[in-house]
Image: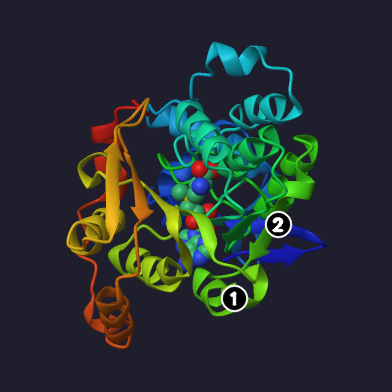
Amino acid sequence: MTVNYKEEVFYSTQELSHMWKVPQEQIKKIVTDKQFTQHQINGGEYIQKHDLDNLVDELLSSLGVSHVYYEIPEFLKTCTSPWAVTLVKMYQDKFTCPASISPIQGDLLRTLVGDIAPKNVLEIGCYTGVSTVWLAAGLEQVGSKATVHSVDLFVDPIMPVAPSHCGYLDNPLEYAQKSVDSAQLSHRVKFHKMHSIEMGEKVDELLNESIDFLFIDGDHTITGCVNDFRLFYPHVSVGGYIILHDIYPEVCAWNGPRYVIDNFIKKSPHFELLEIKTSPKNFGMAFIRKLGRDKKLEFFLQATSKLSDTIRDKPIGNFIRKRILRSGINT
Ligand SMILES: C[S@@+](CC[C@H](N)C(=O)[O-])C[C@H]1O[C@@H](n2cnc3c(N)ncnc32)[C@H](O)[C@@H]1O
């Protein structure tokens, strides 16, 4: 359990063991061998918060797992625009890969936003703001006056959970805001720290217009993704775009986006769908254009939301192990 002691935050080795799914003895051994300072509080062994990042490094290395970073393409490295310089810096942080979109995927979003020039962008799930910077850079490039509204729970702190993110981050909202500031894009971005369901209830009041570009990259479970689709799809303008990330469960190990595509998008004549491969790993993205209102689908989604307890995710195995094996990016 976390304790605050003399204005410092401490984590018990028992809690870390539970969180990282590693035997407590293994953590204790690293703590002793590598001479981390242990604190005895209320009879338990505790590690100070600022030691966690180094502890994770040692732990991962003892498991034979090394940090993996996205390769930065030449065009991004050499670009001197503040957004590019900021992104290069963000991609050097341990918690970025593979939880955030890759530079190649980000550039695709940036150019799309530049081409479409939407009057607004709504992003569900921004994590530390990498995709947000890419989206805002696209708007900025075409001199759009639009805003990227970005919703996330911004759960503090981001704990290392290999392999989905391997670094520790104290305050993701602060990090995201600082990144957007250093990208000189703060006039283009508004962060909303809330659950997407809460955003769904406020979307009319907050945006005051329909959504032209909706990027869904939040809760990837079936229940979560169906909920986000149900809440926001009716607010997308006719001709507007919905982008889903992580659409290939066999690679990304999440099945929510696939479920939405197969059960709603493909079954309705009111969408155009393009699935594309992504790099460096094919987690996949779907570009969906809303051609018209599908009242039957809207009615169905509203009706089933009342029965959402019956839409159950089927766990697809040990997420962490599968992701290591399938992505091959942490071995
Ligand atoms: C895969 S990460 C997003 C990565 C980000 N789009 C990027 O490319 O940099 C998923 C994020 O969704 C957020 N999230 C999950 N469920 C959510 C919900 N119901 N409402 C708001 N945010 C949610 C998580 O906090 C997490 O930061």
- Residue at the right extreme? 6
Helix or strand or loop: what does disc 1 sit on? helix
Residue found 53% across the figure and 32% down from its top: 111
The residue nearer to you, when weighing 117 against 202, is 117
Residue found 23% across the figure and 76% down from its top: 311
Q: Is residue 82 visible?
A: yes
Residue type at numbered disc 2:
Lys
Residue found 23% across the figure and 47% down from its top: 249
Looking at the image, is mark 2 or mark 1 earlier in the sequence? 2
Label 1 crowd bin: few (<14), some (14–19), many (20+), radius 10 Å: few
Which residue position is annotated with label 2? Answer: 190
Compared to 105, does 48 lie above or below? below
Q: Which label is found at residue 204? A: 1
Residue 290 rendering spot, x and y as whole percentages: 36, 58
In the picture provided, is 199 more to the left or to the right than 308? right
Residue 307 rendering spot, x and y as whole percentages: 27, 86
Compared to 20, does 101 lie above or below? above
Residue found 73% across the figure and 42% down from its top: 180
Compared to 32, does 11 lie above or below? below
Q: Nearer the viewer, mark 2 or mark 1?
A: 1
* Mark 1 Cβ and ligand 1 under 8 Å apart: no
Residue type at numbered disc 1:
Asp
In the picture provided, is 221 more to the left or to the right than 17? left
In the picture provided, is 219 more to the left or to the right than 281? right
> The N terminus appears in which quarter of the rendering?
bottom right
Residue 257 rendering spot, x and y as whole percentages: 30, 55
